[in-house]
Every structure is written in structure tokens, then in C-alpha cells.
Image (cartoon, helix red, strand yellow):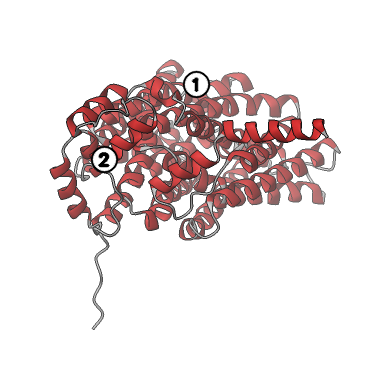
Amino acid sequence: MITLRVPPKYVLASILCSFGGFLFGMDTGIIGPVTVMNGYVASFGSVSSTVHGLIVSTILIPAAISSFFAGKVADILGRPKAISLGALIFGLGAALEAGAADLAMFIVGRCVEGIGEGLYLGTLVVYICEISPPSKRGPLTSAPQLLITMGLCVGFFICYGSTNIGSSLSWRLPFAILSVLAFSFSLASLWLTPSPRWLTLHGRTAEAAAAWDILGVSHAEREKIEIVEHIREITESGETNASRAATPQDTLQGAKKKNNFWELFTHDVRDRTFLAVFMMGMQQLSGIDGVLYYAPLLFQQAGLSSSEASFLASGVSALVIFGVTIPALIWADGWGRRHSTIYGGIGLGIIMFLIGGLYAGTAVHNNSGAGRWVVIVSIYLFAMLYSFSWGVGIKIYAAEIQPQRTRAAATSLAHGSNWAANFLVALTTPILLANSSYGAYFLFGGCSLLTALVCSIFMPETRGRSLEEIEEAFKKTSVSKRLAKAVQKTLGRAAL
């Protein structure tokens, strides 16, 4: 007789929490197809490429702004309540979009949706990172990315199914479904177990121990997160007097006082802050959301003139992304964050330069020729490689390299960088495509190669390491030490 083994509750909590990624992915999959639907154009009229970009990207600036405050909200309310609040606001925004009477109301709905998205999306990874044992952290913190790709599939195919409805319901229905799902997730998030690390940070050590037991994390797997960790962190950052012993109460009060925005730039933390902000911003400047938001336009540009054909191609690309993300999640700890980021960036840059070169060399013909099929296949390859490398590794890395006392705030700041870069991509992609068939591809390819170069210099490996071991790795590979060594080598050569 086969008995089914129930997964530990930290796994179940991570899966539930990851559903927030599904909402984000579904919205991304919806907005591109919706804005080119006949029903949508009939409701709001035709718009220029600039206005089109603004409509799509209006969700991103509110998300960037709210993400800067998400860490503070998560530190005050706790991770689950912050996630629930963000999902509730996101659902209200989607409901406004579904019921929009004019374009202004639709844009307001996207702004409200963005506020909620910025509040909850960064907190998801922080929460999963904090409740997961080091050996399981990679796959579990990759789960939101898997759900994002699933949401993309659902969003694209809902639009593919609703586009032939002969009324405004064709574009309203996807947002109505998204709103219902967001409200359901908001309620479900309240049942998540509080983060034991958050409880410890607030001096509730007995509750933290009970939370670890509820989550099913064994004593052998639990990392050292007691007050002594805060004593060590604060002592190392120079905030306590080394000549006197700090009591747990003093340490806790000091940790609370230091829990502010400027602490992200203290000498022991700033290298990690800057690296996370850079990597999360450049993740979007690879052009991935230009591909996801405007997939129908990209396929039309490559020669798929039929709207149904471009919608179907967009849906297939989402299925490809979802399929690739599954093994990427399984192997998240297999070949390391550093290798996946560097080699992935090189591959992404090469693909973008290939597409741009084909357009620049007029090798792409709308109705015939091999060039257009090379472009279409390259778009699929780009999405696959991104999902297998940057889509999984960078978000994990940005959260896990931060020390406990700044993890929520630093991850929120990094996600703010991600949202801001995403806004630039969403706004400029249709403008670039309207004015140049190849400019966008060369821009995104250059950004990918630049990121690979920077990460090859400043990015230490974190695979399989505890959060304390990661902190030690950054002390050994800090930017200041690397620059000092480079200067010493230069001076030594000059002396010779």
C-alpha cells in the first residue's frame, strides 16, 4: 500500500505564498493582448505608440514607489499581513479596470493595481527565504517565478479565448477573473504562519520557536537567528561599544532603531544593497517584459499579421516559458547563482544582437523568407534562456545576500529598481519598435552583456550556503576590497 507523504508546512506555505506570482504573471499576460483587441479599441479608441506604452506601463511607477515602503510595512505588520494587504489593493485595481467606463478610469485602475503589486510581490520572496532551510531555499524561492510563468499562460489563453466575444466583455472578462483571484489570495494569505525570523527580530523568541515547529523545520536545519546574531551584526557594523557587553534587551532596541532606510548604506551592508539594486534593475533591461508585454506586436513585426496568429504565438511562448521554468526550479541549486547569471547574460545578449542584426541587415521579410522564422524562434529561445537563468536566480540572490536586519528593506529597494527599469522598458519598447526595427534589440542586448561583465567581477556564489556563510563571503569579496586589490596591482606594475 502506497502512503502519500504530506510535505512540511514550510513547503505548503511557500506554495500558497507563491500564488502572488501567478497574479503578477496573469496581469502581464493580459495587458498586451487586451490593448490590441478590437473590443478594447472600440471602447477607448486608437492611440499612438507613446500612449500605448504609457497605458501598459502605468502599473509600474506606483509599484516602484510602493515597493520602497513594502519593507517597512512588512517589518511592522509581519510578512503575511503585508502580502494580504497588497493583494487586496491589487484586486481593487483589477476590478476598476474590469469596470472602466473610460480610459482615465482604466489607467487609475492600473495605478491602484500597481500599488498593491509593489507591496506584496517583493515580500513574497523575503517570506519564503526566511522560512526555508538553506538546502531547500533555492527551489522554494524559485516557486513564485514558476507561478508567474503559469499566470502568463493563463492570461494569454484567456485573452485568446475572449477576443472573439462581440462586446466589451472580451477585454473586461480577463480583469474580472484576475480581481476575483486576487481577493481570494488576500484572504488565504492571512492563514500563513508568521516568519520566525521576523518574530525573533521583534523579541518574540518563544513564538519564533513555535513557528519553526509549525512549519516543520528541524532543529538541525534551523539557522542561528537568535538575539546573539543581532549582537554580532550590530557589533560588526560598529554600532555597539566593543568595550561593554550588550544585553539582549539593548541589542533588540538597537536593532529596532537601526531598522531604517539609511542602514542599507552602512559600510557592512552597502555592497550587497548596490549589487541587488543593480541586478534587479538590469534584469528588466534585458528586455524580458518588452517581450512579454508586447509579444503580439513582436510577432506581427516578424510577419504574423493575423491577430489570432500573433495571440496564439504569444500563448505558445508563455507555455514554453512555463515548461522551461519547471526544470529551472528543480535545478535552482544545481549550477549556482553566479554561473546562471553570467552565462545567462551572455546568451541573452547574443540572441538580442542576432535579432537586431537581422532587422538591421533587412533580412526579415514580413510575408516570406527564413529571416522572420529565425526571429520568431529567437524570441522563443530568449524567453526560455531568461526563464532558465535570470528569471530564477536573480530574485533569489537579491533576497538571500541581505543580512536579517535589512533583508525586507533591501529587497524592497531592489524590487523598486526592478519596477523602475520595467517602466522604462514597457514605455519605450513600442516607441522604439515604431521608429526602428532593431534599436530595442541592440539596447537590451548591450544591457545583458554589461550585467554579465559586472557580475563576473562582483558576484560571489551563494548556492547551498547558510545566510551567515553568505555574509562571510561578502566580507571577503566586497567591492572596496576588490578595488583596493586592483589599485595595488596597477601601482605594482607601474613601479616595475
Which residue was labeled with disc 1? 44
Residue type at tag 1: Phe
331 displayed left or right of 1 = right
Q: Position of residue 409 (x, y in %)?
A: 37, 29
Asked whether residue 285 appears in the rendered view, the answer is yes
Q: Nearer the viewer, residue 237 or 387?
A: 237
Q: How many marks?
A: 2
Q: Residue at x 27, y 30 (%)?
A: 75
Which residue was labeled with disc 2? 228
148 displayed left or right of 132 = right
Q: Nearer the viewer, residue 116 or 172?
A: 116
Mark 2: give few (<14), some (14-19) or many (20+) Cα within 10 Å: some
Vertical order, 133 against 449 (above or below): below
Mark 1: give few (<14), some (14-19) or many (20+) Cα within 10 Å: some
Quadrant of the snapshot with the N terminus: bottom left
Q: Position of residue 245 (x, y in %)?
A: 24, 32
Q: Nearer the viewer, residue 153 or 247?
A: 247
Vertical order, 357 against 115 (above or below): below
Residue type at tag 2: Val
Question: In whole angstroms, how far apart are the C-alphas of marks 2 and 1?
Answer: 60 Å
Quadrant of the snapshot with the C terminus: top right
273 displayed left or right of 309 = left
Q: Nearer the viewer, residue 79 or 232?
A: 232
Q: Residue at x 45, y 44 (%)?
A: 472
Vertical order, 237 against 332 (above or below): above
Q: Position of residue 220 (x, y in %)?
A: 28, 60
Asked whether residue 48 appears in the rendered view, the answer is no
Q: Quadrant of residue 355?
A: top right
Q: Position of residue 27 (x, y in %)?
A: 44, 36
